[in-house]
Image (spheres, helix red, strand yellow):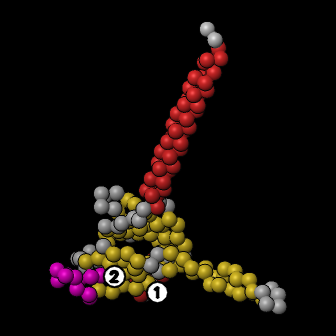
Amino acid sequence: MNSRGFGPVKLVCGGALVLILLVCYVGSVGSRAEASLSTTRLATSPLTGVSYQVVVEGRWSGSFTAFSGIGSGSDVVEQKTGETTVTRTPGKLQWHNVTLNRSLSSDRRLWEWRQEVVVGKVAGARAKCTITMMGAEGKPVAVWELTSAWPCDLTAGAKTAGGGVIEEVTIAYDSMVRTQ
């Protein structure tokens, strides 16, 4: 048999094989990219808190329905480094107070914790405070640990839609870490 007659067939078959391999490779890259994008979406999707569990080490624990203010900020210090050049650097670190709300109950432990501060026993009132944001499934979705936390404000009075009274506590702290 003449080997010259099979040359174009080999070329077409080889080209088809390369094309099939290329399509399969590009498809798998696309699938990996889509899977990676899906994972990124999960990691960056917004967390929704249904309730907030608060544990003040050695004192009390409770559930709250609203939470705001946790975090930190830095003063911005401007330094002139040339005739017209200004360098901006972080200055003093400040921790924001955290505010929590719940329905007022007969449990007085939060009020008693605040009373320690009112009578001047701030050092004794300071404690580790853990705030856990619970998702709709009842599982923790975020956790913050506050160091040397103490209640700097406690109020009650706003009414809920159901006629109950809202209790609001504001907690100051020396440092904070988000552990989850």
Q: Where is residue 113 in the image (x, y as percent from the top left)?
A: 38, 78
Labelled pair 1, 2 in contact (Cβ < 8 Å): no
Judge by depth and name the residue closer to the eye, 100 or 28. 28
Percent across and percent down for residue 109 are: 32, 75
Image position, residue 63 (x, y; %): 31, 69
Q: Indicate left or right for 144 with 18 as reference.
A: left
Report x, y in % for residue 44: 46, 61
Please give the label number shown on residue 168. 2
Q: Quadrant of the N terminus?
A: top right
Report how far apart the C-alphas of labels 1 and 2 lie in the structure: 21 Å
- Reading the image, the residue beneath label 1 is 120
Q: Which stretch is magenta?
A: 157-167
> Who is closer to the viewer here, 136 or 28?
28
Q: Is residue 109 visible?
A: no
Identify the amino acid type marked 2.
Answer: Glu
Relative depth, front residue between 16 and 172: 16
Quadrant of residue 106 within the rendered picture:
bottom left
Determine whether, in the image, residue 107 is placed left or right of residue 2.
Answer: left
96 up-or-down from 157: above or below: above
Horizontal side of 80 relative to 164 (left or right) equals right
Q: What element carries label 2?
A: strand
User: Exactly how many numbered labels are in the figure?
Assistant: 2
- Sort mark 2 into few (<14), some (14-19) or many (20+) by Cα contacts within 10 Å: many
Residue at the right extreme of this rendering: 83
1 or 2: tag closer to the N-terminus:
1
Determine if the magenta segment contains residue 122. no
Residue for point 41% across, 77% down: 68
- Point out which mark residue 146 bears: none
Question: Which kind of residue does numbered mark 1 sit on?
Answer: Gly
- Left or right of 172: which side holds 76? right
Please tell me whether residue 52 is drawn above or below residue 113 in the rendered image.
above
